[in-house]
Image: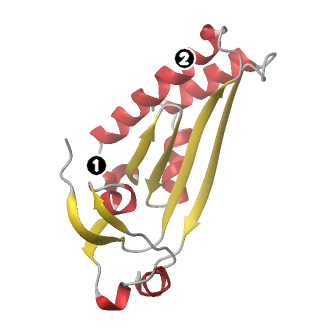
């Protein structure tokens, strides 16, 4: 079990970064041959990303699991490079998904949202929690008197 941090902490990350939300929706549960390959593909991608240094991939970490998750990336360029690299797990899974779904897009839904975050334009608080989210992807820091409120933290995150 993860260690519980028994005080208020916040997150710090140097520079700009990207928050990537990704998930799937099973619209027709009985069509397992349509959605199971999607469900199996994501853990393979995460294992591949975890095995490589963040300096190489730009992948900083993730929270959540099937059927949705939050990922943290150093930049959109890193995220896009991973997604388009023909020798990574994502590309063959993506082309396979499109081939299988071309005539049945309503069987399984997939979605993602990408947010570029400029340095210092974020805020986070954790209390009585294990290390998670941005504090895990970047660094954790004790909350100071100057960072007591969300408004103060978002102004001092840089």
- Badge 2 marks a residue whose secondary structure is helix
Residue at point 49%, 31% (across, down): 66
Residue at point 43%, 42% (across, down): 64
Q: Quick one: quadrant of the N terminus?
A: top left
**In the rendered structure, which disc, 1 or 2, sits on the residue that comes first in sequence?**
2
Q: CA distance from mark 1 to mark 2?
A: 27 Å
Q: Residues within 10 Å of mark 1 (few under 14, many from 20)?
A: few
Q: Quadrant of residue 130?
A: bottom left
Nearer the camera: disc 1 or disc 2: 2
Where residue 101 appears, as percent x and y from the top left, is 73, 19
Where residue 70 appears, as percent x and y from the top left, is 49, 48
Residue at point 43%, 60% (across, down): 74
Residue 154, label in figure: none
Towards the viewer: 95 or 69: 69
Position of 16 relative to 4 (above/below) = below
Where residue 33 appears, as percent x and y from the top left, is 61, 8
Residue 37, label in figure: 2
- Badge 1 marks a residue whose secondary structure is loop
Position of 75 relative to 16 (above/below) = above
Towards the viewer: 11 or 58: 11
Where residue 117 appears, as percent x and y from the top left, is 54, 69
Q: Quick one: quadrant of the C terminus?
A: bottom left
Position of 47 relative to 135 (above/below) = above
Towards the viewer: 156 or 16: 156
């Amino acid at each position: 079990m993860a260690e519980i941090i028994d005080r208020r902490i916040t997150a710090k990350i140097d520079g700009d970064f990207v928050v990537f939300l990704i998930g799937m929706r099973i619209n027709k549960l009985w069509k397992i041959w349509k959605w199971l390959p999607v469900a199996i593909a994501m853990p393979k991608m995460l294992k591949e990303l975890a095995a490589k240094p963040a300096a190489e991939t730009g992948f900083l970490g993730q929270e959540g699991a099937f059927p949705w998750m939050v990922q943290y990336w150093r930049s959109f360029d890193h995220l896009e490079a991973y997604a388009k690299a023909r020798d990574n797990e994502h590309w063959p899974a993506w082309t396979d998904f499109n081939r299988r779904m071309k005539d049945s897009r309503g069987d399984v839904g997939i979605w993602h949202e990408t947010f570029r975050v400029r340095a210092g334009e974020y805020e986070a608080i954790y209390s009585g929690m294990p290390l998670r989210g941005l504090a895990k992807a970047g660094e954790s820091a004790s909350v100071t008197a100057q960072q007591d409120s969300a408004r103060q933290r978002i102004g001092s995150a840089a």
